[in-house]
Image (spheres, grey):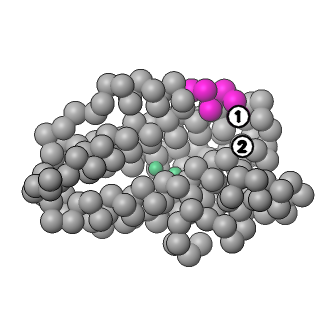
Amino acid sequence: MTTSHGSAALHRLLRLAYSAERAAAYAYQGHARSVADFGEKTRIRAIEAEEWLHRDHVGRMLGRLGLRPSPWLEFKYAVIGRIISAACHVIGHFQGMYFAGRLESGNVNEYLHLAKLIEGTVLADELACVLEMARVEKEHEVYFLSRIAVHPWLPWFSRVFAWGPGKSFNDVPG
Ligand SMILES: [Fe+2]
Ligand SMILES: [Fe+2]
C-alpha cells in the first residue's frame, strides 16, 4: 500500500541506503590508506566525504517520515564496511578499484529507484537531491574505472564479474 509517507519498499530502501552509505564511507577509509598515489588518496577521501553527505541526506528523509534507522542494518553494514576497509590492504590496487567501481555502479540504480519511490509522497520535494546522489555515484563509478582502464586484468574481470568498460549496471551515460 502506498500512502503520502510512501510504501514499505520506500522505507526499506531508505533504511538500507542509510546503513550502506556508512559501509561505503568506512570502506573508503581503508581504501584511501591502502593506495600509495597521493592523487588517488585525496580523491578517495573526497569520495568518502560524499558518502557521509549522502548518509546525512538519507537520514533527513528517514526523519521526515518519522522512521528510525534499522539497528540490524546499521550493525550489519558497519561490519561489512570495516571488513572491506581492512581487505583493501590485502587485495591490491586493481581489485580495490575494480570492486569499488562495480559497487558504485549498483548504487546509481538504488538512487534512481528511490527517485521513483518518492513520487507522490511527502518526500517528492527531495527529487533533485536524490537525482544528484545518483549523479555523484555515477561519477564515483567512472572514476574507479578510469584508474584501471588500461590494466591487463580488466577484460577478464569484466567477463567474470559483469562490470567494466561499456558494461554498467545502470543506463546513465558516463
Ligand atoms: Fe553514496
Ligand atoms: Fe559512491
Is residue 154 something that shows in the picture? no
* Mark 1 vs 2, N-terminal side: 1
Which residue does the image show at 36% across and 25% down from the upper left?
A: 72
Which residue does the image show at 56% across and 58% down from the upper left?
A: 105
Of residues 33 and 158, which is closer to you in this image?
Answer: 158
Q: Secondary structure at mark 1?
A: helix
Q: Position of residue 20 (x, y in %)?
A: 44, 40
Q: Secondary structure at mark 2?
A: helix
For residue 90, side relative to residue 119 (left or right) = right
Whether residue 8 appears in magenta in the rendering, the answer is no
Instruction: List the single residue furthest toward the front.
Output: 1
Residue receiving disc 1: 88
Is residue 18 something that shows in the picture? yes
Callout 1 touching callout 2 (CB < 8 Å): yes
- Name the kind of residue labelled 2 in the image: Gly
Q: Position of residue 57 (x, y in %)?
A: 31, 49
Q: Is residue 174 above or below residue 47?
A: below
Residue range of the region highlighted in magenta in the rendering: 82-88
Quarter assignment of residue 22:
top left
For residue 40, side relative to residue 17 (left or right) = right
Instruction: List the single residue furthest toward the right.
Output: 152
Of residues 100 and 16, which is closer to you in this image?
Answer: 16
For residue 68, side relative to residue 57 (left or right) = left
Of residues 83 and 139, which is closer to you in this image?
Answer: 83
Whether residue 85 appears in magenta in the rendering, the answer is yes
For residue 36, side relative to residue 163 (left or right) = right
- Name the kind of residue labelled 1 in the image: Cys
Residue receiving disc 2: 96
Which residue does the image show at 77% across and 59% down from the upper left?
A: 159
Q: Position of residue 80 (x, y in %)?
A: 54, 29
Which residue does the image show at 45% across and 26% down from the upper left?
A: 76
Tag 2: Cα neighbours inside 10 Å, few (<14), some, or many (≥20)? many
